[in-house]
Each structure stands twice: as C-alpha cells, then as structure tokens.
Amino acid sequence: MPEHALPVVAVLATGGTIAGAQADATSAGYKAGSFSVNALLAAVPQLTGIAEIRAEQVANVGSQNMTHDVWRALAERVDALCQDPSVAGIVITHGTDTLEETAYFLSLVIQHDKPVVLVGAMRPATALGAEGPANLYNAVALARHPDARGRGPLVVMNDDVHYAREIQKIASAGLCAFTSPNRGRAGVMHGGMPCFYSLNTTTHTTQSEFSLALLDKAGWPRVDIVYAYANLQADLIDFLAGVAEGIVLAGVGDGNATDLAIDALSQAVADGVAVVRASRTGSGFVARDVELDDASLGFIAARDLNPQKARILLMLGLSLTRDPASLQAIFDRY
C-alpha cells in the first residue's frame, strides 16, 4: 500500500436512531433506519480525510427489533472483514436500545483482535443538534487507530469509549445515556484520537471459546429473562420452564426474588433448565451463595453482568455444556 494511502475502514449499517428521521424537526417521534449507510456517510464529509470507507447495509431496523439472524449476519461479515488484510478496522452503526447486547455478543464470537467499533445516536439524523455525525466520525477514527486493536469490540458514544462487556444504557433519552457502571469507561475520544485509561482485562475475542458453529450445533438455545418485583408469582416461571433452556432472573437487590419464584426456579433447575441470578438494579455484583444457597439450588451467579448480557452468555454457555458448575465457571471467566 502506498505511504500516502488512507487506512480502510468498513462501515456496516443496521439502522437505528442514528439513521432515523422525524416527521418534522421538533417532533419527539421518528422512524428508525430511514437513511441508508451512504446517506449517513455523506453527512460526515470529514471522513474522507481520515479513512477510505467501504460501506455495507447489513440491516435497517430499530434495535428493539434486533434478531439473532442479524447477529449472525454481522458476526459472519465481521469475521470475513477481520481476515481481509486490507481492512484496518470495522464500524457498526446500531440503534441504542440493544447496542450493548450486540457488542457483547460479538465480543464472544469474533475471534480476532482487529478493531470493531459500534456506534449509535440518541437523536435522529434530522433532529436539531443531532450527534450522529460526530459519533460516526469518532467511531471511524477509533477503528483506524492501532491502539484500539486487541481490546475486543468497543462502543463510542458522546466522546466516551466503552468496552462491550461493561457498557449499559441507563437513560431513555439525552446524550449522556450510556455508562460503564462497574469498571468504568475504556477511555475518551479527544480531537479524533483515542485516549485509553486501561487495558481490558476481561476475556474476549481471540481468547473466547464460543463460535457461531457451536451455536448452530446447539440450535441457538432459548434463554428468557424474568423480572423480579413485589409479589412475583410462580406461574410465569413455570410456563417459561416448559419452553426455555435457560432463565435469567433479573432479581431484586443482589439477585433475589419472592420465595414462590425461587421455589419455581429451583424446580426448573430440577427439570433441566439452567437458571442464572442477575440484578435488576443496574450495577453491582451478584455473588455466589449470598442470600441464596446457589450450590443446593443449582443456580448460577451472574457476577457483574446485567440480565441482558447474562442472557447472551448463558445462551452461548449452553452451546458448550448443561452442567451448572461448568456454566458457573464460564460466568466466572467472562
């Protein structure tokens, strides 16, 4: 490659608010995925000065409608691009609602160290003060930078850089809607350059034991989430135990629920369903054998994974094993 050539960054678009359009500039409502990837790129002409862009439209949905099929398409395309020596990094534009889930899934099945950066926006493209163009510029700048290599998929929003495992959406609106509540941000973008605070110490990408092939063989195990609340009854859990291979409890406090719910979950374990205890609180640590005797009940402690990410890890874990102790070891590693 000539010395003056710009690094190649592939941009994979999936829709979302960053590509959304309002009926008018002051409307609170909008239609996600209204603009194509080429339209998004055209709104950021400064990109031509930092990278050669190769754009692809993988999907065009609001991320509340994100599916396993889109995850598969993204994972397969990212895998292929990671093997292309001409590509320096990959950017994925994504809706914010399930952005953290897609990022975490990819971090567990993409076995490469090439930069992969997910990005979205809290305001649609037609809004006054839309931040999508600045976020997209930062995402490309991050994906092209060698310091982003080997950290697993990253997320950039509002100048903040987050690791896929740590990021969480904490607000329904506003620019400061994302944080990494337990271990903190990976770093920040400043003047189009990343400033990382620390290395990611979690297992991901090249160290991951998961793959699409294993998921296919296992049939993408069904895992559902039960949200705990006052007076939670057993019948919903009993129903899920009949259709799901795994259940994640979004528990009160450090992963607890009513006695009726705990009894039903214990019976689900006896019937062969894997059960993980997580917390609905948004941060903190669900430790094993605290308040509940996980060993005797057969439960798995999610540690500091939120329920939606615990669901992903349990699904992947079930592609390897059905043994609760082995599944707990997976949660301890990831």
Image (cartoon, grey):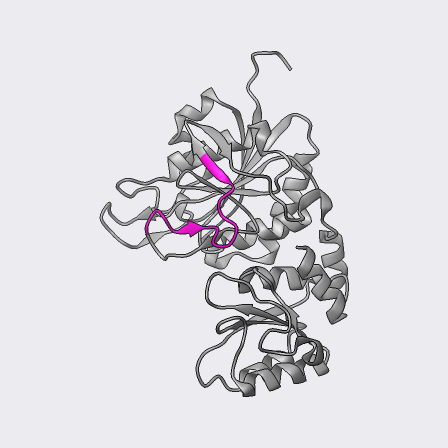
- Residue sitting at the far front: 290
- Say if residue 34 shows up in the picture: no
Quadrant housing the N terminus:
top right
Residue at (61% x, 65% y) in the render: 302
Side of 45 relative to 57 (left or right): left
- Residue sitting at the far top: 3
Residue at (60% x, 39% y) in the render: 199
Q: Is residue 289 above or below residue 109?
A: below
Which of these two is toward me, 97 or 191? 191
**In the picture, residue 171 is in which quadrant?**
bottom left
Residue at (45% x, 86% y) in the render: 231
- Dominant SS of magenta comes to loop
Side of 8 relative to 227 (left or right): right
- Say if residue 249 shows up in the picture: yes
Q: Is residue 178 magenta?
A: yes
- Residue 281: give x, y in percent of width and height: 46, 66
Q: Is residue 97 above or below residue 130?
A: below
Counting every numbered tag in the picture gives 0
- Residue 51: give x, y in percent of width and height: 52, 24
Residue at (61% x, 85% y) in the render: 264
- Residue 174: give x, y in percent of width and height: 32, 50
Q: Which residues are magenta?
A: 174-188
- Residue 37: give x, y in percent of width and height: 47, 38
Side of 113 relative to 53 (left or right): right
Q: Is residue 236 magenta?
A: no
Q: Is residue 103 above or below residue 250?
A: above
